[in-house]
Image (spheres, helix red, strand yellow):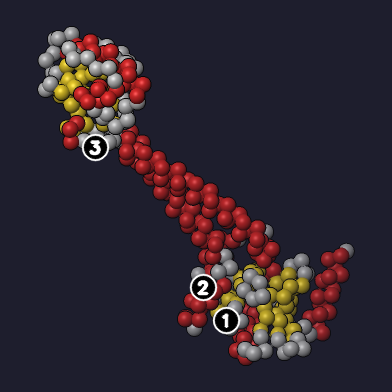
Amino acid sequence: MKYQMNRLRDMIKVLYPYRVYRNLKRIFALLSLLMFILMIVFCFIEPEAIRFEEATDLQYAYMDIDFISQDHYQGYYIVEKDGYCYIYHQAEDGLDQALVYLQNGKNHTAKVYGVPDNEVSDDVLKGLIPIFNQIYSDPVDTIEELVYYTGYQYLDHDMTPNAYQIGICMVFTVVFFLAIWILKAGEMIYTRRFSPYFANICYRGEEQSALEELQHPIHAFYHLKAVLLPNYLVCNHPVPFMIAYEDIVMIYERHGLSKDTRLIIYDRDLKKKTILSASSLNFKSHEEMRMLLSYISEKYPNILVGDTRENMSVLLQMKSLSKQ
């Protein structure tokens, strides 16, 4: 029986997407929040700087310099260390006191921090050529000649130290946030597609409780493709269907000419629905249908079980009263 219940639970999946969408949305929401928090943390935590020569792109680095140019181009300076010159970027007029002293000859060395970057634009390099020529006796005329001395890589003081980590967190935050909306759209599409089958419980707003009950069925009918929950009857043949027992007014089986048997109910609105079908080729499905009706008849005396003359008379009376 346990095996059949597990197989049936896998087969029916009447409200399975609700659980999937709900859990995935929660997971992605938590991951998105975690990435956002990490992004904020990385904005305020300054990592340990490594030597500029050893650093790669987007690693926080430092450089001991013994010269910085008086002039700059859009915040780009020529700096020197042990006879080698480099490009250093810091916001215009944003030099700290140590660098100002170095410019004025009051300091012999200074330490600058930043993030290495390999993309100095040609416009910046052109603007640095006259500054370079003011400093050194060997003038340069072209970008290629300047790059021969400075290289393309420069140290950017204004770039966030944890730019790489922040960028990764930002990307994943956006990805997870978009995933939440994609899942939400999928949930809406699923709900719209199957809402007619769930109309008997959706009006109550009980999808969540029904989903929880689906994990613990009382009786499972594998061949009939139906399951009895504590408060709901679930079917998957011919269409997915779920209804609370208290919304069932009458339930009975109808035999066709082909010896197939259909299970028919009248719901709280006295509407007739075919919710199950037992094939004539599957004897066990007929036996399970009798077991299902027997269980409902025993546990729910208020439900009219069987299309007897007495039950049909009561049903007709209820219909007539509903029209008044």
Q: Say which of 183 and 63 sits in front.
A: 63
Q: Residue at x 81, y 77 (%)?
A: 314
The label number, if any, that marks residue 10 in the structure image: 2
Residue 220 sits above or below residue 25 on the image: below
Q: Residue at x 50, y 70 (%)?
A: 215
User: Measured from the top left, where is residue 306 in percent x and y?
Assistant: 74, 83
Residue flagged by tag 3: what amino acid is it? Answer: Thr
Disc 3 to disc 1, how far (Cα)?
Answer: 64 Å
Q: Are marks 3 and 2 in contact (CB under 8 Å)?
A: no
Q: Earlier in the sequence, mark 3 or mark 2?
A: 2
Q: Earlier in the sequence, mark 2 or mark 1?
A: 2
Q: Is residue 17 left or right of residue 164?
A: right
Q: Residue at x 27, y 25 (%)?
A: 144
Q: Say which of 249 and 223 sits in front.
A: 223
Q: Which residue is mark 3?
A: 56
Disc 2 to disc 1, how far (Cα)?
Answer: 13 Å
Disc 3 to disc 2, how far (Cα)?
Answer: 51 Å
Residue flagged by tag 2: what amino acid is it? Answer: Asp
Which tag is nearer the camera, tag 3 or tag 2?
A: 3
